[in-house]
Amino acid sequence: MIRVLEPEVINQIAAGEVIERPFSVLKELLENSLDAGAERIEVEIQEGGRDLVSVRDDAAGFSREDLELAFVSHATSKLSRLEDLNAIVSLGFRGEALASIGSVSRARILSRAGDADSGAEVRAVGGRGGPVSPAAAARGTIVEVRDLFYNVPARRRFLKSPQAERARCLEVFTRLALAHPDTGFQLAGGGRTLRLLPGETLSQRVGKLFGGRTESLCLPVRAEREGIRVAGLAVDPDGARRDRSQELLFLNGRPIKDRSLSHAIAQAYRDYLMGGKYPVSFLFLTLDPREVDVNVHPTKAEVRFHRARLVYSVVHQAVRAALGRRQARLGERTLESVAELRPRTGFPELPAGLFGAGEAIGQGFGKLPGAGRRTAREARPDARATFRNVRDFLVVRDLYVVFETDDGIAIVDQHALHERVIYEKLLRGWREGKCPVQRLLLPAILELAPADKDTLLGHREELGRGGLVLSDFGGGSIKLEGYPAALKRVDPKDLVDGLLRDIQEHGPPREPEELRERLHSAACRSAVMAGDRLGEAELRALLRAASSLEHPDNCPHGRPTVL
Ligand code: ADP
Ligand code: MG
């Protein structure tokens, strides 16, 4: 039997599209406040937004009649004729957000329009807007969204930890705050309050959101061609990160992701960055809205440019020019100071290296004539034995150690092996309940993006157990007081960067065990990168250590160590 769906059900279905997690609620509410012309916006988030997302603004407010319709789907003041779709300027336009939010949470809107002498409120109950009642309110609007997905248990269960949800909310907040430097923002809840004043410059905002070092490395970007304008900041390659999370792009004031433009930026940085590092940049594209299709993605995060090639080339050249100005400045420095700019590590990233991706020793030996079809497990005792009686060896390009074995020759990826050795050392320390800590004489103060800081502090205890001792240093900074002693010498910043990147790549750790794993693999990676070229004695020690490893055949990330 065909039935017409109840509006609550339709809204819940729509909500599935628009409201995915707390950050989606925050995004819609912030966009509404900005659309309504807010000069100041205050956000509060509790339990990563599961308990509460609240956004308060000083904008135009809702009239009483508007409030009646606030939780009704396809009610929007922003779009009435189809042609408007071709020239969308405002941030939200589908008239779906509030209705969707109201259908999956306990939401309340309290508002007072600029010309009204009193306020009013409306609540969404059981997926419907309730009656509008008078209430005391300052000019502007507060939207409170509590208990997200309380009536959709399957979705509620799907939410991640409060820290993880909070981190996503912070990302949304950060993007919108960057896009609207004229608007003042405040973010409360979860301990610290972040305040961004109205009318800050972009680089001041970058400083508050990403730290003073990033701010000091900003290079201005500005270019215009055939009506396509790009402006913003490109961060000096010295401020590059190990992930793309701080490569932010905006189109006509709206945060977007665009693979092709991301590529354009990466290409511009290509000559300046080592493998595995990504640009940090905050770029704002402005062009005629009719030149873009923004309606290709349900949350409008992806767009389609009509003159895509031209846009690519404008962005690419603008960033290149900015970085070129940096080069000119460096040229004026003395030779000595330029020498410092050489990459600190001598070894390139070798994801596949000599051995082909993911080919462990088992398969590797399996290919040798006579080795038959041994499984990786059967081959493992061989891997350990391989290292047992090494007499002479040859080092090739500081990357590979070659030596004779009983039945052939072995080629060892010394960095992969080194990582494995350090990793197992850390693991042993942790298992035996004593991970010796190297206390820093001078604690390192690291400035981090708010989301990153929250992630680390949220796991402080487990990290401590893994050997990483850190604490809140106030503002956007953390204080690193110690790290696992098994890492003789590592750059604390690299260590923390590596850890954050692991967390970002693999999602937030669900159990302490997983976190420890991330810490240790980041730790040994950066220990190896910071390490010196190995001398003969060290190489011998390394090979000896390999003969008693649990898993000598792969580095902790699965790269084969020996062929
Ligand atoms: P849309 O933003 O797509 O129009 P929403 O469901 O997000 O749909 O909002 C519905 C309408 O409610 C908006 O068109 C706007 O008129 C009004 N509105 C929402 N938030 C605010 C706010 N903070 N201040 C004033 N009006 C608002
Ligand atoms: Mg909206």
Image: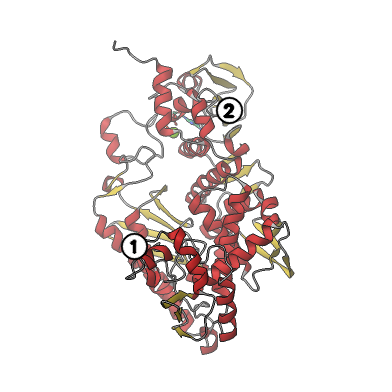
Instruction: Identify the image quadrant of the C terminus.
Output: bottom left
**In terms of image quadrants, where is residue 270?**
bottom left
Task: Kindly identify the amino acid type of the residue bearing the numbered disc 2.
Answer: Asp
461 up-or-down from 278: above or below: above
> What kind of element bears circle 2?
loop
Asked whether mark 1 and ligand 2 are closer than 8 Å, the reply comes as: no
Task: Kindly identify the amino acid type of the residue bearing the numbered disc 1.
Answer: Ala
Instruction: Identify the image quadrant of the N terminus.
Output: top left
> Which residue shows up at 35% across the image and 46% down it?
302
Where does residue 263 sit, x and y in percent of width and height? Answer: 34, 61
Task: Decide if residue 189 is on the left or right side of residue 356.
Answer: right
* 10 Å crowding of disc 2: few (<14), some (14-19), many (20+): some
Marker disc for residue 56: none
Quadrant containing ligand 1? top left
Q: Name the residue under label 2.
A: 147
Where does residue 50 sit, x and y in percent of width and height? Answer: 58, 33
Asked whether the viewer can see residue 233, the reply is no
> Which residue shows up at 39% across the image and 21% down it?
10
Marker disc for residue 264: 1
In the rendered structure, which disc, 2 or 1, sits on the residue that comes first in sequence? 2
